[in-house]
Amino acid sequence: MIRNISSLILDYKKCGYILLLIIATVNASISANTIKPFKSDGCSLFPEGSPKQKMLWIECCVKHDYAYWKGGSFRERIEADRQLKACIKKVANPQLALLMQASVRVGGTPFLPTPFRWGYGWKYPRFYKKITEKEIQKINKVDGYIDN
C-alpha cells in the first residue's frame, strides 16, 4: 500500500512537471511570436552625423533600424546593410559608408542579445527567420513607422 502511495505521488509530480513544461512552452511560443513597438536608437553606438552636421545620416540609421527591428532572413539582413551603405555613401562618403556597413555586420548579429541585433523587435532568440504572413500583420499593427 505504501509503495502504491509513493508511486502515486511520483506520478503526480511527473504530471506536474509535464504540465509546467507545457505551460512554459506555450507561453514561450506566444511571447516569441509577438513584436514590440518600433523604436530606434539612431545610429546605435555610432555618431549620427558629422561635427558640423550633427544629424547628417540619422535618417539612414532609422531606416536601417526599422529593417533590423523586423528581422527576417539572412539575405534580408544583407540587403538592409547594403541599403545603409548606399544611403551613407549618398549623404556622406564611401569610406564612412564602408565603415558603418562593417560595423553593423559585426555588431548586429542576431546571435547576441543586444538591443540592436537583427530582429530586435522579437523576443530573443529569433536568429534568421523568414517573416510569416501573420507576423507581417502584427508588424503592420504595431510599427508606427512609415517605410518610404
Image (cartoon, rainbow, N blue to C red):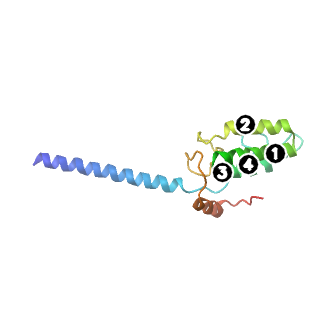
Name which residue lies at 28% across and 48% down: 14
Question: Mark number for residue 86?
Answer: 1
Q: Which residue is mark 4?
A: 64
Residue highlighted by disc 3: 69
Q: Nearer the viewer, residue 130 or 46?
A: 130
Sequence order check, earlier mark of 3 and 4: 4
* Residue position marked by numbered label 2 in the rendering: 103
Residue 71's spot in the image, x, y percent?
Answer: 64, 50
Q: Amino acid at mark 3?
A: Trp
Q: Quadrant of the C terminus?
A: bottom right
* Left or right of residue 90: residue 25: left
Which is more N-terminal, label 3 or label 2? 3
From the viewer's perspective, tell me whether residue 13 is left or right of residue 41.
Answer: left
> Which comes before the other along the chain, label 1 or label 2?
1
Under tag 1, what secondary structure?
helix
Q: CA distance from mark 3 to mark 4?
A: 9 Å
Find the distance from the CA under tag 4 to the CA under tag 2: 13 Å
Instruction: Return the disc, 4 or 1, that comes first in the chain's sequence.
Output: 4
Disc 1 crowd, CA 10 A, few/some/many (<14, 14-19, 20+): some
Q: Which is more foreground, mark 4 or mark 1? A: 1
Is the residue marked by circle 2 packed among few (<14), some (14-19), or many (20+) residues within 10 Å?
A: some
